[in-house]
Image: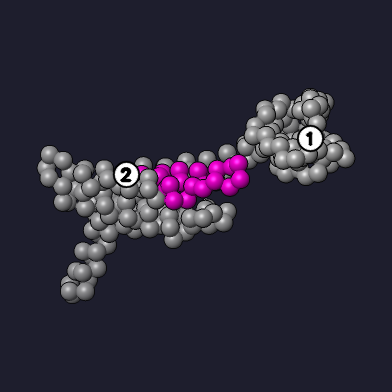
Amino acid sequence: MSDLQILFEHIFYNDDFIKILASTVVGALVGLEREYRSKSAGLRTFTLICVGSTIFTILSEKMGIVTSPDRIAANVVTGIGFLGAGVIFKMDDRVKGLTTATIIWVTASLGMAIGDGHIMLSFLGTTVVYIVLGLFVKLEVIMERFGQTRNYKIVCEYSPEIYKKLENSFEQCKLTAKREKQTITKDLLISNWSVRGRISKHDKLVKKLMGDKEVRELEF
């Protein structure tokens, strides 16, 4: 047997090589889904997160002392939290990136599972991730038809009766409204509301408000 054959056998039958290969596949599978949806973290990011978590877990077992071989691996959980926080940001009244941050956290756990030798567990976890990201999105769309919360910003002429008028508009459209921040500038009222109800009722409300001459601006 040649030295080259011995080298290849040593590489391909090496547990660490198999773990790195498996983590690359798992990270790529998760990353492809995020890339397809054009999210802030995509294919390369999730692949590297999974591979990095696997390597740190392997090193934790090799470098850790006998009584505590998990020291390095334990810090992966802490470190990945900082990375996940970087993709969370606030846009207007909405928080974006929570799902992506959560998937970063889950991908790190998949990589750590592979690093500890639980490859089948990691692939099972990847399957669950795909089910949640694929099937649950459709379920959310169905649920939104029965109830969706929207944040409305209504700019209109101010009068003592304006709040009652807006509340009546919500009630007529069969929507539940909660008054948020209110700003009065000269003769104008900038009114923010959190409104929940069916999508069809929201559409009815928008048409009603846009037909009101006192409403200067509507944002949701």
The answer, for residue 5, to whether it is visible in the render is yes
Nearer to the camera, 168 or 38: 168
Nearer to the camera, 6 or 186: 186
Q: Quadrant of the C terminus?
A: top right
Judging by the rendered image, the residue that carries numbered circle 2 is 78
Q: Amino acid at mark 2?
A: Thr
- What count of labels does the image hold? 2
The verdict on residue 86 being magenta is yes
Q: Residue at x 41, y 44 (%)?
A: 106
Left or right, 19 with respect to 92, comes to: left
Residue 205 placement (x, y as % from top left):
80, 35
Left or right, 36 with respect to 6, comes to: right
Of the numbered discs 2 and 1, the one sitting upstream in the chain is 2
Q: Amino acid at mark 1?
A: Tyr
Left or right, 193 with respect to 73, comes to: right
Q: Residue at x 12, y 39 (%)?
A: 67
